[in-house]
Image (cartoon, rainbow, N blue to C red):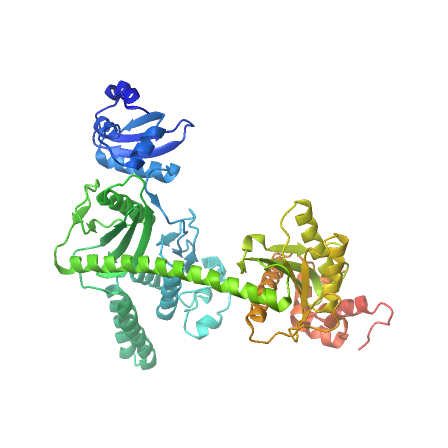
Amino acid sequence: MTQEAFSKIAPTIPTQPGVYKYFDNTGTIIYVGKAKNLRKRVSSYFNKNITNYKTHELVKRIAKIEFTIVDSESDAFILENSLIKEFQPRYNISLKDDKSYPYIVIKNEPFPRVYLTRQPVNDGSEYLGPYTSVFKVRELLEFIRRTIPLRTCTLNLTPKNIERKKFKVCLEYHIGNCKGPCEGLQSQEEYEANIRQVKNLLKGNLAPVIRQFKEEMKALAANLEFEKAEQIKKKIEYLEDYYQAKTVITGLKGGDKDVFSIIKNDDIAYVNFLMVRNGTIVQTHTNKLETHLDEPVEEVLVYAIERLRSTFNSDAKEIVVPIPIDYPESDVKIVVPKAGDRKKLIELSEKNAGYFIEELKNKERLKINRNVDQVKVLEQLQADLQLQQLPVHIECFDNSNFQGSYPVSAMVCFKNGVPSKKDYRHFNIKTVQGINDFASMKEAVYRRYKRLKEEQQPLPQLVIIDGGKGQLGAAMEAIEELELHGKITLIGLAKNEEEIFFPGDQESLKLPYSSPSLKFIRFIRDQVHRFGVTFHRAKRSKGTFKNELESINGIGKNTADMLLKTFRSVKNVSQKGVEELAPVIGKAKAQIVWNYFHTDKEPQKD
């Protein structure tokens, strides 16, 4: 939009507080801003004295301007941030943080469980967090498990079920991690008291937790239960020595506080957030932001504060910052410390931001070094296998089955020496009856490269078959049927000796066990094995596979599962007599199973 075009609409722009939106000629929002005085603020973008190149680029792209009038600057601030979150305009500050953060959930159920989740749902449960790292959450949960006895089972502990004696205590009860609410050994009131302790711990409020433990310890000692009192004493020491040593930074008084610092380098800003509760730093997090219009550091900091407080559900009424800012929430106190504990917190926040920046630089350096190292490994692999091309694209196949049944195949893909997980593939074997590793391998390889050929996708320079000459020969049959012979190099990796076979060769290639090439091939092989086993387990857990034993008339899924669990395979079951099967599934069903596998024999008699 030109200055001349803007001058025609300028008088129509309101002078009240509000939010303005700039659209380009495609109708896309490219910038959202707030203002105390909309006309004054928008007019500043069309000032002839503007020297900022990025602002000029923005103004050139403005085709339409829209306004939303609000009652106050605070309302404008809230609306602006919600619009930026929703539309993510190109020229607004962008927060480089797309993580999903973990929460600790206190489940809405009788005798609530406490566990980690990344997906809060509106089910009436209480969600504490989010937290900045899964490691921190797991550490907190482990600490709670050591300190406060809570159940971890998924039993439906309704009063009716407990009264009917439907459940029995498990190992967790016997080792002291649970007090047995499933058998009515712990009351709902006592359990709720434990949940309150959990909430205090997660909020950094240790005093009431320690106080309750001391009361319990005194009561146990008065009843001469010294061993139990000693256990409580150890929990108190654990709290004081471990938890406080890790998290308490200062005895700062005066309620909850959010501490922010900012380091800005050109178009990149780093904002650190310390969440201080009851004198304890319970959260710390640093975000990277990209600025696009040379926004002043104060504006970037205000934007980051709103986003971080929203993300981490903070309602602290005091914000500690290194520079004066115009923060529109009237009930929040802004403190810019010159000395004292708050100043120390700012310095600590800046130290965390600096550490974050150094970590990013180190990761970038490691990434560059890793790329160099991977190229060296690929060059060594090319030399060791005498490949015509550098194997920048490698694929590896493996078969998987469960106790001699239910075959599947898996393929992993490596590009430039690193896993390309989006290219990993699973194969449900469709054309092979029973267990036939060779035929299964041929089917998987054929289906993979038939598709790549039809879609005219790049072929790998190297294909690794996890198996010996038989599997390699079967895979080579698929390649020849697809007329890809000479376009892909196949090798087989023998499972036991880790020898490498080429199609048609009688002798294997034995690389030194510690050679980079063999280590890399083993790593790829381990990846495909893990990928295949994970797929197989997932299918079994979903009941995708049907146990052969279930096809026996009179034998259900539970009985079949008991047999497999005891005897490990269908083949082993088929070789057992009635007297061996009967202790597991009963005499009548044992006879049915035996008859199924011995139809040409007389039924066994006692």
Relative to residue 133, is residue 260 drawn left or right? left
Answer with left or right where residue 345 lies relative to residue 119: left
Would you say residue 401 is visible in this rendering?
A: no
Q: Where is residue 199 in the image (x, y as percent from the top left)?
A: 32, 59
Q: Which sits in the foreground, 126 or 339?
A: 339
Residue 283 image offset from top left, x and y in percent: 30, 58
The answer to whether any part of residue 205 appears in the image is: yes
Quarter holding residue 332: top left
Quadrant of the image containing the N terminus: top left
Residue 295 vs 159, above or below: the answer is above
Q: Residue 378: percent from the left, percent from the top?
A: 56, 63
Near-viewer residue (195 or 457) = 457
- Residue in the picture at 47% in, 62% down: 372
70 or 499, nearer to the observer: 499
Q: Nearest the camera: 444 or 606?
A: 444
Q: Residue at x 61, y 69 (%)?
A: 384
Check the image and report above or below for 450 versus 219.
above
